[in-house]
Image (cartoon, rainbow, N blue to C red):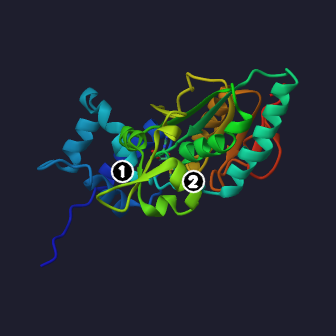
C-alpha cells in the first residue's frame, strides 16, 4: 500500500513561507504547498514533524540550520561556463581593459571579483580558470575571487571542489588536464590547487550588506528568480555598494532586474557598470 506522506497544513505553510521570506528574500508561490512539504521533509530528523522542525528552526539553536533549510527549498544547480558569453566577456574585454588601465598607471595591479550566490562553486572556479588562462598578462597582479552563499552546506562542497561529470561538460580537455583531477573511485572531477588558491568562500546573505569589497566585478546569476521586488531592491543596493567605481555587474538571464539597475550604466543585456555618478 502506498504510504501517504504528511503535508504542511495551510497555517504551517504560511508560517514557513513568512520565515523563508524574512530570512532569504525568497517568495514561495501560493500553489507550492506540496512542493514545499516535500522539500522540508528532507530536513526532518528521525521522529521530527513539521511543527517541531519549525520550532527548532526559529529558535536560537536553529541558527546553523537556516542555510541548509534555504538550500533544501531552492535549487543550487550550477555548472562550469554556464552562459559562456559572460566568461568570454570577462576573459577578453574586461581583463583587456583592466590590464591596459594598469599599464597606463590608472589603476593598481589588483583585481577582486565577487561571485554572489555561488552555490557549490562552479561559477567562481570558472572565473579562476579565466584568470589562469590569462596569467601570462597578469604577472605581478594580486588576484582574488570571493564566492558567497547563504548555504554552509553548498559552501563546504565548494571548498571540497568535487564535481559530477554534468557540471564539467563545458570544460575542454586541455582545461581538465590543467585544472582538474579525476577521482579514482567514481566519475567525479576535483578542482586542483591552482584554481583553489585563487578562490575563497564565505557565508553571506544577500539581504545583508557585503562587509568586504570593493569589487571590480560582481557576478549575480540564477539567484534572484524567486525574490520579490522589495527584496531584489535590497540586494541591488548591496551589490551597487560593493562595486568599485568603474566596476561591472554581470547579471544572469533570470534575475528580472532589468528595470531596477538605474544607478548603473547599462552596457548590454547582461552587463552594467558603476559610473562616478552612481
Ligand atoms: C541556482 S544557484 C546559482 C549558482 C550560480 N550563481 C550559477 O549561476 O550557476 C542559487 C544559489 O543562491 C543561493 N541563495 C538563495 N538565496 C540567497 C540569499 N538570500 N543570499 C545568498 N545566497 C542565496 C542558494 O543557496 C543557491 O546556492
Q: Say which residue label 1 marks.
A: 72
Q: Is 210 located above or below residue 219 in the figure? A: above
Q: Which residue is mark 2?
A: 175
Q: CA distance from mark 2 to mark 1?
A: 32 Å
Determine the image quadrant of residue 236.
top right
At 19% across and 43% down in the image, what residue appears? 52
Nearer the observer, 270 or 125: 125
In this view, 129 is above or below 205: below
- Could one spot residue 220 in this view of the protein? yes
Kindly tell me whether residue 171 is visible in this rendering: no
Mark carried by residue 37: none
Residue 80 percent coordinates (x, y)? 55, 54
Quadrant the C terminus occupies: top right
| Residue 20 percent across, percent down from the top left | 41, 43
Q: Quadrant of residue 7?
A: bottom left
Task: Give the mark toward the camera: 2 or 1.
Answer: 2
247 relative to 22 in the view: left or right? right
Q: Is mark 1 within 8 Å of ligand 1?
A: no
Amino acid at each position: 500500500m502506498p504510504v501517504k506522506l504528511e503535508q504542511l497544513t495551510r497555517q504551517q505553510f504560511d508560517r514557513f513561507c513568512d520565515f523563508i521570506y524574512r530570512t532569504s528574500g525568497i517568495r514561495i508561490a501560493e500553489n507550492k504547498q506540496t512542493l514545499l512539504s516535500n522539500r522540508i521533509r528532507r530536513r526532518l530528523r528521525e521522529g521530527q514533524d513539521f511543527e517541531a522542525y519549525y520550532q527548532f528552526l526559529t529558535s536560537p539553536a536553529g541558527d546553523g540550520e537556516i542555510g541548509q533549510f534555504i538550500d533544501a527549498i531552492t535549487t543550487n544547480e550550477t555548472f562550469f561556463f554556464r552562459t559562456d558569453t559572460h566568461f568570454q566577456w570577462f576573459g577578453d574585454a574586461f581583463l583587456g581593459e583592466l590590464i591596459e588601465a594598469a599599464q597606463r598607471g590608472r589603476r593598481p595591479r589588483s583585481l577582486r571579483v565577487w561571485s554572489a550566490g555561488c552555490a557549490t562553486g562552479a561559477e567562481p572556479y570558472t572565473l579562476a580558470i579565466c584568470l589562469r588562462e590569462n596569467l601570462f598578462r597578469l604577472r605581478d597582479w594580486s588576484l582574488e575571487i570571493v564566492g558567497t552563499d547563504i548555504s554552509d552546506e553548498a559552501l563546504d562542497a565548494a571548498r571540497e571542489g568535487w564535481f559530477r561529470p554534468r557540471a564539467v561538460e563545458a570544460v575542454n580537455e586541455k582545461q581538465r588536464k590543467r585544472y582538474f583531477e579525476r577521482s579514482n573511485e567514481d566519475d567525479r572531477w576535483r578542482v586542483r590547487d591552482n584554481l583553489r588558491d585563487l578562490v575563497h568562500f564565505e557565508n553571506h546573505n544577500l539581504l545583508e550588506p557585503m562587509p568586504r569589497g570593493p569589487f571590480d566585478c560582481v557576478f549575480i546569476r540564477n539567484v534572484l528568480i524567486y525574490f520579490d521586488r522589495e527584496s531584489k531592491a535590497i540586494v541591488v543596493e548591496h551589490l551597487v555598494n560593493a562595486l568599485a567605481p568603474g566596476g561591472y555587474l554581470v547579471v544572469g538571464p533570470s534575475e528580472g532586474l532589468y528595470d531596477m539597475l538605474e544607478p548603473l550604466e547599462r552596457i548590454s543585456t547582461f552587463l552594467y557598470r558603476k559610473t562616478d555618478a552612481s
